[in-house]
Image (cartoon, coloured by chain):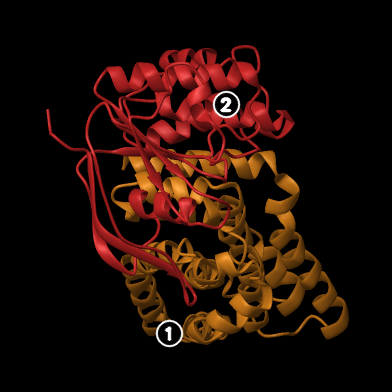
Chain colours: A red, B orange
Amino acid sequence: MQDHLLVAEAIRCSVGDRVLFSELSLVVRPGDRVEIRGPNGSGKSTLLRCLVGLHEPDSGAVDRTADGVYVGHRSGICGRMTPIENLRWFAGIANASANDESLATALIRVGLGPARHELCDSLSAGQQRRVSLARLLVGPTPLWILDEPLTALDDDGRDLLGDLLAAHCSTGGAAVCATHQVLSAAPGARATRTVALGT
Amino acid sequence: MRLFVAQFRRDLLVAVRSRSDAANPLVFFVLATVLLGLGGGANLAPGAIWVLALFANVLAVEGVFRRDHDDGTLEQLLIHAQPLFPAVMGKLAAHWALSGAPVAVLSPVAAIMLTGTTSGIGVLVLTLCIGTPALTLLGAIGSALTVATGRGGLLVAILVLPFYVPVLIFGASASTAAVSGDPVAFQLLALSALLAGCLTAAPFAVGKALAISQEY
């Protein structure tokens, strides 16, 4: 097994003249649960978008040795398709070897068993968030990058995410998670490391 | 190939589920043909059909990435689709199958209405079949560049119309020459060359433009 999944070296990002963060280095190894904390506008989302490769940092480099799944502010699910169709498409583009059975299992795991054949447009915000989380279970992706994963989730969803994170990290996976809520309230989701932004 | 198929199937499915959006450009083509026939008489050049097809294409391609950008499936595609080329091709192929291809299929009817003759219809359909995919590929670059600005519309049209001009010239010229029975081989070859160029280069440009659109 590789000794690290992701290395960020001295990255720097700015919006206009305002520097969000600079000289930020981060190594993510299997089993890590890194929590990014900071007030609104401190650059949490930008940092995660750098880590996943959607945003090019002003300077520094990000080296990903493993595949990552990203759950961001935009759901990444199409409202005109059902949850299972969304996952099928995702498995197709992410080169995950998943059949309909395993995709259905993933949806049942996130509590969407009965709703998995309804159009996502007709699902609630919390249910849509659960569809996004089901992406984490499609194929074995070692690195999870989560941006405010608790948004719109109920207490049960919060516990679910805690369980998923705990199971993932105990089997050699790692997660980087941005939040300004207390994710560690979820059992098993305690961060092994915290990166504070905007201080 | 797997990426192409996954994206192609998904986009067809979404288009079928949102029929009214997908049919807009086609409705425009039909209405404009009818109005032009009523207003301009029945002896127009086949070039008129090409202009209508071109505008129908701009209308359609302008929003090809909009919904995906808004719901975040575009960023998922950019993260996971390795390489991006076949996924972009799948997306644009599905888009063309529901915008360019129907226009080519309907063009004989439009030709009879507007030009009043059936001669050269085969060549017209052929030029549209070669030309409209090239237009879609070129237009997709403009659409990808403007997707994050939230206002495509006229901006896309202004960006891409200059690049549409060569396709329009060769397409309309071949269609016009065919009506009078003149040779059309040169125009068809030039049109095919344009399509070949677009097929190889445009998806890369689209991919790059989409990646830039996610930087904010």
**Percent from the top left, x then y, of residue A65?**
19, 42
Q: Which residue is mark 2?
A: A130
Q: Which residue is mark 1?
A: B183
Question: Which of B80/A177 is in front?
Answer: A177
Chain under callout 1 = B
Q: Residue at x 62, y 71 (%)?
A: B58
Q: Using the image, determine if residue A192 lies above or below residue B39.
A: above
Q: Residue at x 58, y 53 (%)?
A: A40
Q: Quadrant of residue B6?
A: top left
Q: Quadrant of residue B215?
A: bottom left
| Residue A103 seen by the camera | no
| Residue B110 seen by the camera | yes
Mark seen at residue A193: none
Classed neighbour count for the residue bearing mark 2: other residues with Cα under 10 Å, few (<14), some (14–19), many (≥20)? many
Question: Which of A168/A137 is in front?
Answer: A168
Q: Amino acid at mark 1?
A: Pro
Question: Which of A26/A175 is in front?
Answer: A26
Q: Using the image, determine if residue A127 lies above or below residue A48.
A: above
**Percent from the top left, x then y, of residue A19?**
43, 69
**A58 relative to A37 in the view: left or right:** left
Q: Using the image, determine if residue A60 lies above or below residue A143.
A: below
Q: Quadrant of the N terminus of chain A?
A: top left
Q: Residue at x 42, y 83 (%)?
A: B187
**Percent from the top left, x then y, of residue B94?**
51, 50
**B29 relative to A183 in the view: left or right:** right
Q: Residue at x 40, y 55 (%)?
A: A54
- Disc 1 on helix, strand or loop? loop
Chain under callout 2 = A
Q: Amino acid at mark 2?
A: Arg
Q: Quadrant of the C terminus of chain A?
A: bottom left
